[in-house]
Image (cartoon, rainbow, N blue to C red):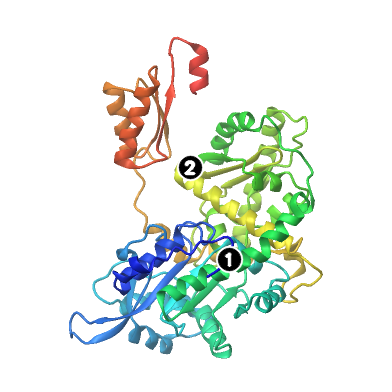
């Protein structure tokens, strides 16, 4: 198989020693290991496997599908929900229509094969109703760029013709049972189809052999990359309406000074941790003429705005000559507006059974000339939120690069900026405050006593300081281990990472007899 961007990592010798469930795990890990294929926690895979019923001993077909909240890159066999196919297909009789589709999720546990394990996700029917043994549903930036383009439907026809693909287009429909029925009909109407582009959502593909399914998926994504990347490269700095500002040379120092201030403000109700990103694509976006308009439109893929909220906070300041105090003033002005706008968005779209508002703070802040700050309950979540908005930038980048005079008449003109089509706010709200998403959040373990705190431990390189640093991390804190002996501080970090993982502690060199050393460490 010839690809330009993605590598075929399927190893026949490795796969030969695996049973069907292990091949599903293997396929999932390969797909999830590359963020160009799907984002962290995004996408899902499945296989319909013949196996013996543990009670009757009779052979039956069981749907193995990635469970709720899992990540494909690290999933094990325990991370898949398992449902009897005959029972799952019988649920069709229970379906009362689009207005009642959420109630279908309550039936999925009744189809469980074996003891209750990982809960089935909202995407389960997409896999169960597709009449192929193996299904991959991915969220690649290149595919979503096409799915979020105002002319995407027409471009898909061009891609099919140029590259010999057989994909069909599915208009926006919230994930769930109704979308599965639409896909099922699409396959009946297009029997030679190997996949579909889901508007403002992603890609789904299928096959009857696991290796074929994997290769179909990366081949399709690679072809979309071949279509989009050259157009992005050709536009270069003309993307997003061209550059309005130049990146500041002192942006890292400025970000270091503004981040603690912004962290305090956005985490006023509930503490958050933050991180700074100034990747080239981020700088191109935040320095562009159309950044403010595109950012206001909001992200399109449901996976994105569950973390990034409906839209980021754009700080409308002039980086050319602006100082720290001016940036603080502009940020506080915009933050007040953001809180009011978000509360209005919630009130406008909430219904009787909507979950309570989860705070109105932004999780992404865009600063012209500087870059992006992202926030989360811990450093790992802050980083992932940033990664998701970088995904969103890639999507907007691709959608704007492939623009022409065509526009799908089904898309409201007000939702389109520079060929990028955002979801209507009403649909975004239905995802962000979906009762099923709320249930997923409630399944998370309670936060520890020191969660969301950053602690500085002086003398953490040995003795009591080392023990105390370890204890704080165990209780949920993030720790800066400071010591006059930097190597000793680094050894403490290594011990912490061995027990608790990365992104929880960092080493600092400090001399407590020097004000300058203390200032630098802080």
Count all numbered tags in the image, as a single digit: 2
Q: Is residue 57 above or below residue 19?
A: below
Q: Residue reaching furthest top?
A: 513
Seen in the image, is 372 located left or right of residue 51? right
Residue 498: horizontal and vertical position, in percent? Answer: 31, 39
Residue 438: horizontal and vertical position, in percent? Answer: 45, 61
Q: Nearer the viewer, residue 12 or 150?
A: 12
State which quadrant residue 171 falls in.
bottom right
Which residue lies under the disc numbered 1?
Answer: 222
Seen in the image, is 261 located left or right of residue 334? left
Seen in the image, is 128 located left or right of residue 332? left
Sequence-first tag of 2 and 1:
1
Quick one: label 2, few (<14), some, or many (20+) residues within 10 Å? few
Quick one: label 1, few (<14), some, or many (20+) residues within 10 Å? many
Q: Nearer the viewer, residue 272 or 172?
A: 172
Seen in the image, is 22 located left or right of residue 135? left
Residue 491: horizontal and vertical position, in percent? Answer: 33, 28
- Depth check, mark 2 against mark 1: the one in front is 1
Under circle 2, the secondary element is loop
In the rendering, which numbered label is found on residue 270?
Answer: 2
Q: In percent of the image, x 65 and y 57: which residue is there?
A: 298
Q: In percent of the image, x 62 and y 72: which residue is there?
A: 199
Under circle 1, the secondary element is helix
Q: Nearer the viewer, residue 473 or 190?
A: 190
In the rendering, which numbered label is found on residue 483?
Answer: none
Q: Is residue 365 above or below residue 303?
A: above
**Cα distance, mark 2 to mark 1?**
41 Å
Residue 60: horizontal and vertical position, in percent? Answer: 28, 85
Residue 336 visible in image: no
């Amino acid at each position: 198989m010839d690809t330009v961007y993605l590598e075929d990592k399927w190893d026949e010798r490795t796969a030969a020693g695996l049973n069907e469930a292990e091949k599903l795990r293997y396929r999932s890990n390969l797909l999830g290991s590359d963020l160009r294929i799907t984002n962290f926690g995004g996408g899902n895979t499945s296989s319909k496997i013949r196996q013996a019923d543990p009670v009757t001993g009779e052979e039956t077909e069981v749907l193995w599908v990635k469970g709720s909240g899992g990540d494909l890159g690290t999933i094990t066999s325990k991370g898949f929900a398992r449902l009897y196919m005959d029972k799952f297909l019988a649920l069709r009789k229970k379906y009362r229509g689009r207005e009642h589709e959420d109630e279908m999720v309550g039936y999925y546990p009744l189809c469980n094969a074996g003891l209750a394990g990982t809960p089935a996700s909202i995407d389960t029917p997409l896999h169960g109703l597709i009449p192929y043994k193996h299904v991959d549903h991915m969220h690649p930036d290149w595919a979503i760029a096409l799915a979020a383009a105002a002319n995407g439907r027409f471009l898909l026809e061009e891609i099919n013709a140029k590259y010999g693909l057989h994909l069909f287009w599915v208009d926006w429909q919230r994930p769930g049972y109704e979308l599965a029925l639409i896909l099922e009909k699409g396959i009946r109407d297009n029997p030679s189809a190997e996949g579909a582009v889901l508007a403002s959502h992603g890609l789904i593909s299928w096959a009857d052999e696991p290796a074929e399914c994997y290769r179909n998926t990366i081949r399709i994504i690679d072809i979309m990359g071949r279509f989009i990347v050259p157009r992005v490269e050709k536009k270069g700095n003309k993307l997003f309406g061209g550059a309005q500002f130049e990146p500041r040379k002192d942006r890292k120092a400025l970000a270091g000074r503004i981040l603690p201030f912004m962290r305090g403000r956005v985490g006023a109700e509930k503490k958050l941790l933050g991180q700074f990103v100034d990747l080239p694509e981020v700088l191109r976006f935040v320095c562009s003429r159309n950044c403010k308009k595109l950012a206001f439109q909001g992200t399109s893929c449901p996976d994105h705005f569950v973390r990034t909220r409906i839209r980021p906070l754009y700080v409308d300041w002039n980086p050319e000559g602006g100082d720290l105090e001016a940036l603080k003033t502009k940020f506080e002005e915009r933050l007040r507006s953001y809180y009011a706008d978000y509360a209005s968005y919630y009130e406008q779209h909430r219904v009787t059974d909507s979950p309570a508002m989860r705070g109105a703070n932004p999780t992404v802040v865009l600063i012209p000339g500087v870059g992006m700050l992202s926030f989360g309950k811990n450093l790992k979540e802050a980083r992932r939120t940033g990664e998701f908005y970088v995904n969103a930038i890639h999507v907007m980048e691709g959608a704007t690069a492939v623009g022409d005079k065509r526009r799908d008449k089904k898309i409201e003109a007000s939702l389109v900026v520079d060929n990028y089509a955002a979801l209507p706010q009403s649909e975004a709200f239905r995802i962000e405050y979906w009762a099923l998403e709320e249930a997923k959040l409630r399944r998370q373990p309670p936060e520890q006593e020191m969660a969301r705190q950053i602690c500085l431990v002086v003398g953490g390189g040995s003795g009591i300081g080392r023990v105390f640093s370890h204890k704080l991390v165990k209780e949920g804190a993030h720790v800066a281990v400071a010591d006059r002996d930097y190597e000793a501080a680094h050894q403490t970090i290594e011990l912490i990472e061995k027990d608790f993982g990365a992104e929880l502690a960092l080493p600092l060199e400090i001399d407590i007899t020097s004000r300058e050393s203390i200032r630098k460490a802080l």
